[in-house]
Image (spheres, rainbow, N blue to C red):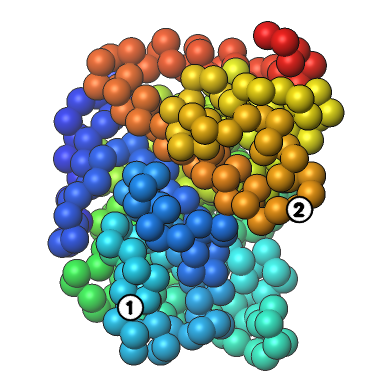
């Protein structure tokens, strides 16, 4: 296999280490910012390098419709096309297709383009082929992700079909320089999660995604289902909790043995003036910040926090300056990457428990509380 995971230290089920690929290696646990249409919105590839993001996730759904995988392949693949020298992972496109109302059959998912209404069929084989053309370092098998809550029979049917599709994806996969990850489904049903984890592991993949969680269900159910899946996955392969990137979610998942995360939340929240800080969430639109000279997070060392005040950034946001989107996105990503770096250090030092308590304390408070104490 083209991808290797090396655990360097553990703290209970939590592990920190490296993922090695033909491109190089990167440390885990790792958070991947999401580039929805070939770019992390409001930032460039050079910005992401400066922020120290080791891996970027590119969304197959959008790239396969525009500019099209043939165009990207002809221009040398996603890395050359986007000027990105770090690692890259592509999703299968399935999540977007299904959340936009695809008709799913055994063959694949029938859907219409959001751009021009044209009809398309995304099969497990097509998802592999498109992702091979895009040329990321890691690609994901096409899975079926039912919207929760769903009837038990539907969740089971989706997990079973995901397994059949995983086998088809593995057969279709040809690029040896690119790793293929299988995906565990099963909703919040722990026995189904365990079944899906065991059967997907038996098929043999370079790594494993855990999909369809953190879609609105209570966190205890997320974590119980996650544990059931992780218990069946081989220790020497990376585990990727898809779509999770909130502070508590990441710390708790790492404590259970997860290595990779992606989430649009840090960048999406930033564009709405909702910021991540060491003391919990901060909503920059609050009037109290109009005259606040302090940085977003006094304990953040990012390029935005060392230079600009809450008052200035709030002003840019209020008047609709595009710079606000860029600077707030910068902070939220820097903060998230910084937290993940602290998670790695905590696991290596055997002190993840302390960090779990700190994060739980900061994020248990309501989003308005920080805003109401501007003088602190
Ligand atoms: Zn900052």
Describe the element under mark 1 as helix, strand or loop: helix
Please, is residue 61 above or below residue 18 in the view? below
Percent across and percent down for residue 124 are 44, 76
User: Judging from the image, what secondary structure is the residue with disc 2 in?
Assistant: loop
- Label 2 or label 1, whichever lies nearer to me, is 2
Left or right of 320, for residue 260: left
- Across and down, in percent, residue 374 comes to 74, 16
The quadrant where residue 293 appears: top right
Q: Residues within 10 Å of mark 1 (few under 14, many from 20)?
A: many
Asked if 181 appears above or below 65 in the picture, the reply is above
The residue nearer to you, when weighing 124 against 325, is 325
In front of the other: 327 or 343: 327
Percent position of residue 160, x then y: 50, 61
Q: Position of residue 358 (x, y in %)?
A: 51, 13
Please identify the quadrant where the N terminus is shown: bottom left
Q: Please tell me which residue is depicted at 76% across the width and 25% down the height of the picture.
A: 291
Q: Is residue 188 left or right of residue 251?
A: right
Q: Is residue 144 visible?
A: no
Residue shown at 60% from the left, 18% from the top = 279
Q: Which residue is mark 2?
A: 320
Residue identifier under label 1: 77
Q: Quadrant of the C terminus?
A: top right
């Amino acid at each position: 296999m083209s991808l290797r995971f090396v655990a360097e230290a553990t703290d209970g089920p939590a592990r920190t280490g490296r993922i090695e690929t033909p491109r190089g290696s990167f440390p885990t646990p790792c958070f991947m910012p999401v580039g929805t249409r070939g770019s992390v919105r409001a930032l460039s590839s050079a910005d992401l390098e400066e922020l120290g993001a080791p891996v970027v996730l590119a969304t197959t759904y959008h790239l396969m419709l525009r500019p099209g995988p043939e165009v990207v392949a002809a221009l040398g693949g996603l890395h050359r096309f986007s000027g990105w020298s770090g690692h890259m992972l592509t999703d299968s496109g399935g999540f977007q297709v299904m959340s936009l109302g695809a008709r799913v059959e055994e063959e694949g998912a029938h859907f219409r383009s959001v751009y021009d209404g044209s009809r398309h069929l995304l099969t497990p084989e097509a998802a592999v082929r498109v992702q091979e053309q895009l040329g990321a370092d890691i690609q994901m098998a096409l899975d079926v992700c039912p919207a929760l809550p769903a009837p038990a029979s539907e969740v089971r049917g989706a997990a079973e079909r995901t397994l059949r599709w995983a086998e088809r994806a593995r057969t279709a996969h040809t690029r040896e320089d690119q790793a293929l990850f299988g995906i565990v489904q099963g909703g919040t049903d722990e026995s189904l999660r365990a079944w899906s984890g065991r059967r997907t592991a038996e098929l043999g993949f370079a790594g494993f995604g855990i999909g369809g969680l953190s879609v609105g269900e209570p966190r205890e159910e997320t974590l119980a289902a996650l544990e059931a899946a992780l218990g069946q996955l081989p220790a020497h392969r990376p585990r990727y909790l898809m779509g999770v990137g909130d502070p508590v979610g990441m710390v708790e998942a790492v404590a259970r043995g997860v290595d990779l995360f992606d989430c649009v939340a840090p960048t999406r929240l930033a564009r709405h003036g909702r910021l991540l800080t060491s003391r919990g969430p901060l909503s920059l639109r609050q009037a109290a910040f109009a005259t606040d000279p302090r940085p977003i997070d006094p304990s953040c060392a990012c390029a935005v926090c060392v230079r600009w005040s809450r008052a200035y950034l709030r002003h840019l946001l209020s008047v609709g300056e595009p710079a606000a989107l860029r600077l707030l996105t910068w902070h939220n990503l820097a903060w998230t990457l910084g937290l993940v770096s602290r998670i790695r250090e905590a696991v290596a030092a055997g002190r993840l428990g302390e960090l779990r308590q700190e994060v739980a304390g900061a994020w248990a408070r309501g989003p308005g509380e920080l805003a109401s104490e501007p003088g602190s």
